[in-house]
Amino acid sequence: MSGSDIYYNSGDVGIGTASPAAILDVFNSSHNTGYGETTQFRVSNASDHASFTRLIFGQASTNNGFIEVSNQGNTKGNLLLQPYGGNVGIGTTSPGYKLHVNGSSMFTSTVNISASSGFASFEMGGPSGAYIDLKNPVSDDYDIRLITTGTGGSIQVGGVGDVMN
């Protein structure tokens, strides 16, 4: 030990646990925020620590964790991923875009596509072609389907054949 620095060169370090199971094991059994057990990392941005930002890691339920940002008054903040460059990948170890999702996705509200200059584009492709379904929310049947197979395409309305080929 030197001054106020702490060095630990072997084994595991536990905070809140006498038997750490990882290199750094942080456990807080007494902090329940109302939506699950949480462990907080606090970053102060004032010398008197009156103003701070918390990065909260928590468990909402079994196999469902969360990360949240809030201040001392529990006002929710923004969680920024790669704000100074780089890409974010979900289901991939080599993201090629700002957000690269390998797998199915679901959006329950509006998806906005825009460009700061030129044209905005929406591109799809698969080994057998691609299609877009505009679905009936009650029956899950499509009302309009746009299809391309790589050799041609069609527009179907109500699932009853080609309107335009």
Image (spheres, rainbow, N blue to C red):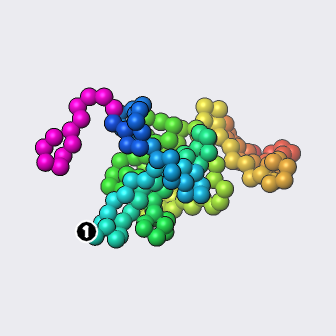
Q: Name the amino acid, label 1.
A: Ser
x and y percent of residue 56 in the render?
A: 46, 54
| 141 is within the stretch colored magenta | no
Q: Give 151 or 28, whichever is nearer the viewer.
A: 28
x and y percent of residue 150 in the render?
A: 63, 36
Q: Which residue is mark 1?
A: 47
x and y percent of residue 85 in the render?
A: 33, 52
> For the point 49% across and 69% down, which residue is it?
75
Q: Give 84 or 65, whichever is nearer the viewer.
A: 65
Inspect this view and state whether residue 161 appears.
yes
Classed neighbour count for the residue bearing mark 1: other residues with Cα under 10 Å, few (<14), some (14–19), many (≥20): few
Is residue 8 shown left or right of residue 128? left
Is residue 53 shown left or right of residue 114? left
Q: Main secondary structure of the magenta part?
A: loop
Inspect this view and state whether residue 157 appears.
no
Q: Give 22 or 87, whichever is nearer the viewer.
A: 22
| 11 is within the stretch colored magenta | yes
> For the point 68% across and 43% down, which residue is it?
131
The N terminus sits in image quarter? top left
Q: What residue range appears in magenta?
A: 1-12
| Residue with the most extreme left position | 2
Is residue 54 shown left or right of residue 64? left
Asked if 95 appears above or below 69 in the picture, the reply is above
> For the point 40% across and 36% down, which residue is it?
18
The C terminus sits in image quarter? top right
x and y percent of residue 32 in the render?
A: 55, 54
